[in-house]
Image: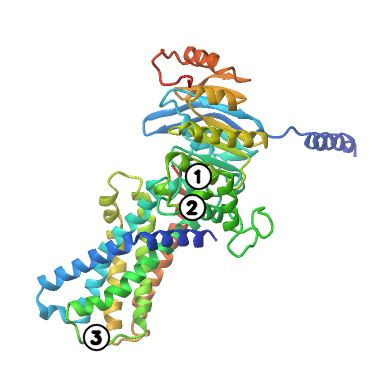
Amino acid sequence: MTVWAIVRKDLSIELRTGETLSSLLLLALLAILIFAFALDPALLAGADFVAGLLWTTLIFAATLALNRSFLLEHEAGGWTGLALAPVDRGSIYLGKAAANLVLLIVAAALLLPLTAVLVGTTRLAPTPALPVVVLLGVTGISAVGTLFAAIAIRTRAREVLLPLLIFPLLAPLVIAAAKATAGALSGKSFAELRSWLLVLGSFDVIFLTAGWTAFDFVIEE
Amino acid sequence: MSHGRPTLALELCVRLRQTRRVPEPVIDARALTKAYGLLPVLRGVDLTVETGESVAILGPNGAGKSTLLRILAGIARPAGGSLRLFGANCFPDRPGRATLARIGFVGHEPLVYRDLTARENLEHYARMYGLGNDHGTPRNGAASGTSAVAVAAGALERAELEGVAGRLARNLSRGMLQRLALARATLHRPDLLLLDEPFSGLDEHSSELLTASLRRAREAGVTSVLVTHDLARLAALASRVLVLESGRFCLDRAPTPPAEELTRIYRSATGLGDDDRVGNRP
């Protein structure tokens, strides 16, 4: 109930304003374009490059979305409103993470084909493993990002602090997600990507559990 | 066997005491302390508030009034002391969900989302407080068939905000926002209402509406703790007044004296001059 109430509220605001998704997509698109123009076209052709480009731009753009998601709570004391509610504070975390996840799924679903088109890659053979890899990857970004955005939002240097906190933590996720995405774009099956999927799944479970248990302390003054 | 009768008598005594037990105070705070970094804000606050009391807290800026209210609301955590709300341990333990469900809080900010309408804000908080859901299943004591939508509609009507229910919160006036904040805080019909400067920035009409709402809450037996600089309204609403200075209570007076006397008492208790912000309303 709490999780759904928060997801519903966040998505209602996003549907009304469109601020987070539009800025996230615009930033990601600009980054992809810069890479596409700045690098040698011969380098861009492979699935490895598309996958790497997708995940690096996605984590940069995600910090923007995550900051925005908590600014929304911060600007009129909504954060205090959440802290006052007689609910498990872990479910507040899960609600915020789920709302951020929806935005990241939409962003990834739009960016993946756009990246392939913009860098001019034609030799891709996506398999059914691709959506699973993307889902596990963005879940990890949302799990880590939601927890640390909630911490960073209380500081004055929030815009700077969030990437400094999450980028080192997201490094293993980005490596696993890029490798698995490249594999899934090159026709590899679930069985062939098993080890990367296991890394991504474990990462998600660890950070979702950490966020759920630690949020009680994060939300308190 | 020889100890049978005294043991039985002792047990009877305990049971008799339990059945005749005086109700626990709504707030029982002992030696509460709080600091922000190295700056101490509360330096050992003792406060007991009984059921149905309307307590007003006065004090100069920076005295620790808002911090105390935030601690009582369960938002901030004290550094030391003990705190019991409705008989439940809230420090060093954390306030439980059952305790939080009995508290309503109006702070400096309206605690509403600016990009949601007044109605959507109240529906969101109704869901957060488990007051029904959109399929009409009652929860947390909500009336049978109550949905979050119906709870919000009732609150909008009580706050006289039906006319602006569909307006975004960012487009509401200060007075409307404050009424919306009070509607949000009383949505779940709390037993303890904590109000931090609820009259600030309100025009006369909005202040009257707010005063009437608070008076109704008081008549309904809701316990309240009010922080305000508006002595005339304070004198009309509170049954007891306390003065907090430098993180400690320096005066506790019940019943609340008339506003003119209150001004004099307050100034003498805090050593403030005539040019201070706290004063009587014309």
The answer to whether any part of residue A181 appears in the image is: yes
Residue at horizontal 60%, vertical 53%?
Answer: B151
Q: Amino acid at mark 2?
A: Asn
Disc 3: host chain? A
Label 3 Cα crowd, 10 Å radius (few <14 / some 14-19 / many 20+): some
Mark 2 secondary-structure assignment? helix
Q: Give the vertical position of B143 relative to B186 (above or below).
A: below
Residue topped by disc 1: B180
- Between residues B62 and A197, which one lies in front from this camera angle? B62
Label 2 Cα crowd, 10 Å radius (few <14 / some 14-19 / many 20+): many
* Occupied quadrant, residue A1: bottom right
Mark 3 secondary-structure assignment? loop
Residue topped by disc 3: A124
Q: Position of residue B183 (x, y in %)?
A: 54, 45
Residue topped by disc 2: B121
| Mark 3 to mark 2 CA distance (whole Å) | 46 Å
Mark 1 secondary-structure assignment? helix
Q: Name which of mark 1 and mark 2 comes first in the sequence.
A: 2
Residue at horizontal 38%, vertical 29%?
Answer: B39
Q: Are marks 1 and 2 in contact (CB under 8 Å)?
A: yes
The answer to whether any part of residue A94 appears in the image is: no
Q: Amino acid at mark 1?
A: Leu
Disc 1: host chain? B
Mark 3 against mark 1, which lies toward the viewer? 1
Residue at horizontal 40%, vertical 72%?
Answer: A201
